[in-house]
């Protein structure tokens, strides 16, 4: 886990390939906490992006509805 502070991604990947038992890393409590935090951050980012996309789509629909009937605003 601490290798990330001193090694770049390529070096860490080579080191991981040489380690026979990856269960040691994946069973680590620190690893589980880091993965859990990453998943939470990913979910939050996904929700924010989804909400933004929903607002854009609704604005498009509203513009298309208003544009379909040019006299709608005058009523």
Image (spheres, rainbow, N blue to C red):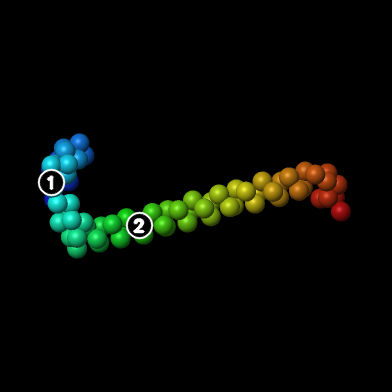
Q: Residue at 36% across / 59% down in the picture?
A: 40
Residue behind mark 2: 39
Q: Residue at 77% across / 43% down in the picture?
A: 67
Q: Is residue 37 left or right of residue 44?
A: left
> Crowdedness of circle 2 by 10 Å Cα count: few (<14), some, many (20+)?
few
Give whichever of discs 2 and 1 has the lower sequence position: 1
Q: Is residue 16 left or right of residue 54?
A: left
**Real-space Cα separation, disc 2 to disc 1, in angstroms:** 25 Å
Residue 16: x and y in percent read: 17, 44
Closest to the observer, 27 or 47: 27
Residue 59 versus residue 44 in the image, above or below: above
Residue 24: x and y in percent read: 15, 56
Q: Dot 2 lies on which element?
A: helix
* Quadrant position of residue 26: bottom left
Residue 11 versus residue 44 in the image, above or below: above
Residue behind mark 1: 19
């Amino acid at each position: 886990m601490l290798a990330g502070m001193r090694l770049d991604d390529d070096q860490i990947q080579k080191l991981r390939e040489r380690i026979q038992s990856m269960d040691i890393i994946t069973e680590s409590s620190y690893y589980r906490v880091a993965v859990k935090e990453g998943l939470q951050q990913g979910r939050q980012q996904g929700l924010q992006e989804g909400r933004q996309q929903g607002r854009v789509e609704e604005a498009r629909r509203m513009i298309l509805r208003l544009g379909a009937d040019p006299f709608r605003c005058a009523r």
